[in-house]
Image (tube, grey):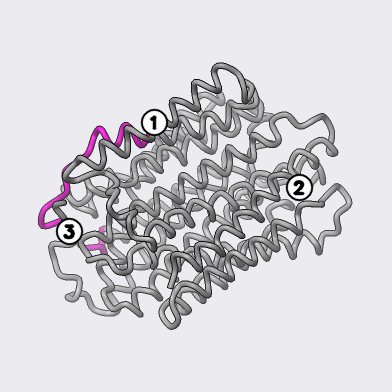
Amino acid sequence: MTTTRLVATPPQGLSLRRRRTVLAVCCLSLFLVGMDTTIVNIGLPAIGRDLGGGTRGLEWTVDAYTLVLAGLLISSGAVADRVGRRRVFQVGLVVFGAASVGCAVASSLGMLVAARVVQGVGASMLSPVALAIVVNAITDPKERARAIGVWAAVFGVSMAAGPVVGGALISAVGWRGVFWVNLPVIAGALVLSALFVPESRAARARRLDPPGQVLLMLLVGLTVGVLIEGPRLGWGSGWALAAYGAVAGVGVVFVVVESRRGEPLMDPALFRRRSFAGAVFGAVVVFVALNVTLLLNTLYLQEVRGMSPAAAGVLTLPMALGATVCAPWAGRMVGQRGARLPLTLAGVFTVVGGLALVGVDARTPVPVLLCAYLAIGVGFGFANAPLTNTAVSGLPPERAGVAGGTTSTARQVGAALGIAVAGAFVAGAGSGAGGLVAAAQPGWLVVAGCGALLVGVAWVAAG
């Protein structure tokens, strides 16, 4: 396979202060992308009341963004290698901002979903470029592990803080505020990137892979679509069975096509490395757990407990706190001891949090909820840095971008799957709070199961 150098200008030329500034600018863009993955969750009840649409329509409001983001991450990174990372980064900011305006002024659920698709296109130009810059600008293994810890902390905090920020905005100005708030962040990122992020291109840019791109989006879209529409179609209906066959067929074709291409979108050879395959699987699992938690929790707190969006957001603060504290801590652990310990802690805390929520009802004491949210936040915080470091460690720098793009794709696939799985559980919930509580119980078991799988990843794939 032909490989590609990620940075034409040696990153060793950057001073410590400049490296930290570049990391800060990249983290700002990651905060924007991550927050928009989850901030809409807290507003789904308000969006449904204003624009109409049932559970499935609201699920598409979230997954339209994550599906496009997942499908285009690697291709956007390849384009950035070819035409310039800073240029693509800034184009992504402009597209993301324009789409945010479209979301904010949407007058129907269909218009909102369409604008979210465009938002996903813009976001795909931000995340892979940011990670490639961080990994290649900081070459010392220990410093890179700490930097990835900071990166993971910002990304984790952005996703965990989404419900908090969203709740406050919705209570203050309505659900449209969760999109208007993006504009000042985008303006700041545009200015800072122009001042501090150097332009760079690959010495030899990877070729684009249109067949792989189309097949990847088909595979992810069909999988998530089956989960979202399954309750309506019937899991054993003819349409559903045909969809299962289509998912399997597209998956096989994707693997065959990518194995035969000289520069594939997603290199199958990387998955022969146990550490890399485990990290990708772990990234999917973590984000399934997080997004199942966020959607079920939003519905539980607002529909069962009768809380306002702001109160529901504040109640999830322990989740953001756990992610904030533990992500940089995990980065330091990785630099000193490797990935196994933080990943094991991530799995154990996620299991505890999921199991603590299995029996919740309308009268569950608030301290129990707070402890469960804290445990899940701690698990999420401990997971991201070791997964990212495990994926890129042991690979030459020129392959770090592909590895990082693949794990970023895995995160967004996990996010989309998590929303679809949670929605499938509650789509057929009976009327009243009791029906929703009962329908959500399997979802909390899924969260706990994801934690158990993370423990397995820690001991099988991480050293």
Number of marks in picture: 3
Looking at the rendered structure, the kind of residue marked 3 is Ser
How far from the left and from the top, in percent, is residue 331? 45, 74
> Up-down: is 281 above or below 387?
above
> Up-down: is 379 above or below 298?
below
Chain-order first, disc 1 or disc 2:
1
Callout 1: 10 Å neighbours few (<14), some, many (20+)? some
What residue is shown with label 3? 200
Q: Quadrant of the rendered structure where residue 213 is?
A: top left
Chain-order first, disc 1 or disc 3:
3
Q: Is residue 405 left or right of residue 154?
A: left
- Quick one: 110 or 294, which is closer to the camera? 294
Looking at the rendered structure, the kind of residue marked 2 is Leu
How far from the left and from the top, in percent, is residue 7? 18, 62
Chain-order first, disc 2 or disc 3:
3
Cα gap from disc 1 to disc 3, whole angstroms: 32 Å
- Quick one: 23 or 241, which is closer to the camera? 241
Residues rendered magenta in the picture: 194-217
Circles 1 and 2, Cβ within 8 Å, touching? The answer is no
Q: Residue at x 46, y 44 (%)?
A: 413
Cα gap from disc 2 to disc 3, whole angstroms: 47 Å
Looking at the rendered structure, the kind of residue marked 1 is Leu
Question: In this orientation, does residue 210 appear?
Answer: yes
| Residue 78 located within the stretch drawn in magenta | no
What residue is shown with label 1? 218
Quadrant location of the C terminus in the rendered image: bottom left
Cα gap from disc 1 to disc 2, whole angstroms: 34 Å
Circles 1 and 3, Cβ within 8 Å, touching? The answer is no
